[in-house]
Amino acid sequence: MNLQTKIILKKETKNRINYNSKLVLLGSCFSKNIGNKLTYFKFQTHQNPFGILFHPKAIENLITNAINKKEYVSKDLIFQDERWHSFDAHSNLSSSNQEILLKKLNSSVQATNKKLKKATHIIITLGTSWVYRSIETDAVVANCHKIPQKKFSKELLSIVEINKSLKTIISLLKSINKDINVLFTVSPIRHLKDGFIENTQSKSHLIAAIHNIVDCKNVSYFPSYEIMMDELRDYRFYSEDMIHPNKIAINYIWEKFNETWFEENTGSIMKEIELIQKGMAHKPFDKNSEKHQNFLQNLESKKEKIRTQFPFINF
């Protein structure tokens, strides 16, 4: 008896991910989930330098500014609720000190420029087609920072607009790194504050636009949204808010991503690193016991073995 419909996944035959890969992750909350997994297993990653970004125009803006090495100045910031913010970044970067925020933004721009030039893969997770446009500047913002909604107009990006934005992203990336592999995915997190029907419309625009450009060289699509909606179509795979995937779902989609995109020999290294990570998290009954000291010595030997193979890995 088959109690589950399965998404047919084709394994990548070239440009697969290994421990020499350099990965940049941009986009919505789901890129954070996958990024955290990659970080745990000690891959070389650069994750959401401007915080979580939900829609294509915000990601296009970040890549444009990173490539052009934009320098943020005080006039680029806004002051709201006793904190300084940037319309280009998530509120996690916001600060009560203007200079601190400018330093964060400009250092992130410089770091992202360098990472994009050296990246083997960029994973872009799109969350929504809904955007907010500042009435005062007529610019689409990445985050409203709880500024009164009357100062923005809400718009749904069309498939044509998203397609144009994605093509611009690819063109910009190829202009500084012609061999970069671009992997798009759509976040399975539902934006229900927009409405059930509106969320479905939003996701469908993203999916349709992505499939118009996946035939480009080194541009791919990973169906994380479809896996969540079809293989895991049960509320037991959601967290308490009934919107975000829970730990089981994240691990399941991560395994599918692993099977599809990672080189076979990478798995054995990941297992060794996981043993080290679990060993480091272990809490002994008696930290001064001979048994625990031997355990620590063995753990250090495992770390040294990994560091010899991959000098960039730190524990």
Image (tube, grey):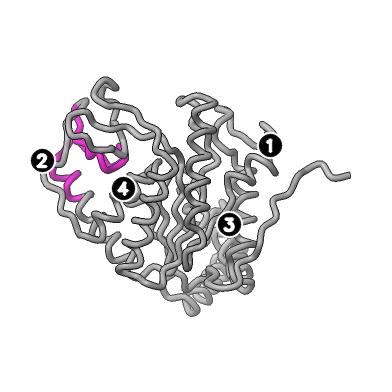
Q: What amino acid is at disc 2? A: Lys
Q: Nearer the viewer, residue 238 or 177?
A: 177
Residue at screen point 34% across, 63% down: 173
- Residue at x-position 68% and y-position 37%: 233
**Local SS, label 3:** helix
Is residue 42 among what the camera can see?
Answer: no
Which badge, 1 or 3, comes first in the chain's sequence?
A: 1
Camera-side mark, 4 or 3:
4
**Callout 2: SS:** helix
At mark 4, the secondary structure is loop
CA distance separating discs 4 and 1: 32 Å
Where is residue 151, by image quadrant? top left
Between circles 2 and 4, the one closer to the viewer is: 2
Report which residue position mark 4 lands on. 50
Estimate the x, y position of residue 17 in percent, counting from the top left.
Answer: 53, 68
Classify 10 Å Cα crowding around label 1: few (below 14), some (14-19), many (20 and above).
some
The earlier-in-sequence mark between 2 and 4 is: 4
Q: Amino acid at mark 3?
A: Lys
Q: Position of residue 163 (x, y in %)?
A: 42, 49
Q: Point out the residue furthest to the right here.
A: 1
Relative side of 207 to 171, left or right: right
**Residue 95 falls inside the magenta stretch:** yes
Query: Of discs 2 and 3, which sits in the foreground?
Result: 2
Q: Which residue is mark 3?
A: 278
* N-term mark: 1 or 2: 2
Question: Label 1, on which residue?
Answer: 233
Q: Amino acid at mark 4?
A: Phe
Tell me which segment is drawn in magenta: 82-103
Residue drawn at x 60%, y 57% is 257
